[in-house]
Amino acid sequence: MVEFGQADLTSCDKEPIHIPGSIQPHGCLLACEGDTFRVRRVSANAATMLGLAGLAPGVLLSDYLSASTLHALRNALAHSLSLGRPAYMFGVHLAGAAAFDLSIHVSGDDIVIECEPEGAPEDNSQSVASLRMMLDRLRNMSDMETLFRAVVRLMRGML
């Protein structure tokens, strides 16, 4: 657990929180171009935290991530865009043995990926977020057969 000192909150309401640029110290942030996943900005701790030596503006994430991880990021991004809110991914292995919980969304022209170390297994936020994403996908299905097939496929993916 990260401990913080006393905070001076007198200017919090004036901070530009809608502009990517910093992140809490227990996580890291990447901002990428939409079509290419070319890195535009990274937090100072991203390369070290993620175990991706050389991660810097200008590089392609496809040079650092497996095809399956990049595919999962694209799927989560599509989900985020369809719902207008961040999509969450849990236990994602970006490099090496460490796993991360990710949030992905669009801010302006950037795809923003926020990363933090994977939560404890007993943390049920993963289950709640996964269930929420599943329900969002099922919400607009009107054909029962399509709905049932989708439920089975999504449940298999959760187990």
Image: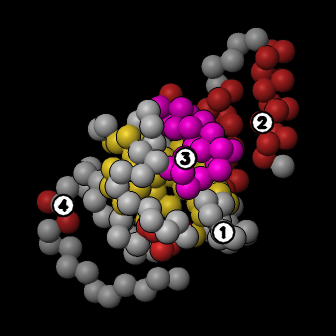
Viewer-closest of 31 and 61: 61
The residue drawn where x is 45% and y is 42% is 37
The residue drawn where x is 63% and y is 19% is 140
Q: Secondary structure at mark 4?
A: loop
Judge depth for marks 2 and 1 and give the one in front: 1
Viewer-closest of 28 and 128: 28
Q: In whole angstroms, how far apart are the C-alphas of marks 2 and 3?
A: 26 Å
State the colouring used for the structure image: secondary structure
**Mark 4 or mark 2, which is nearer the start of the sequence?**
4
Q: In whole angstroms, how far apart are the C-alphas of marks 2 and 1?
A: 27 Å
Q: Amino acid at mark 2?
A: Leu
Q: Is residue 53 left or right of residue 14?
A: right
Mark 3 = which residue?
62
Q: Secondary structure at mark 1?
A: loop
Span highlighted in magenta in the image = 61-81
Q: Amino acid at mark 4?
A: Glu
68 inside magenta stretch: yes
Q: Secondary structure at mark 2?
A: helix
Mark 1 = which residue?
96
Q: In whole angstroms, how far apart are the C-alphas of marks 1 and 3?
A: 16 Å
- Residue 15's tag is 4
Q: Amino acid at mark 1?
A: Gly
Q: Are marks 2 and 4 in contact (CB under 8 Å)?
A: no
The answer to whether any part of residue 128 appears in the image is no
User: What secondary structure predominates along the stretch shown in magenta?
Assistant: helix
Q: In whole angstroms, how far apart are the C-alphas of marks 4 and 3?
A: 33 Å
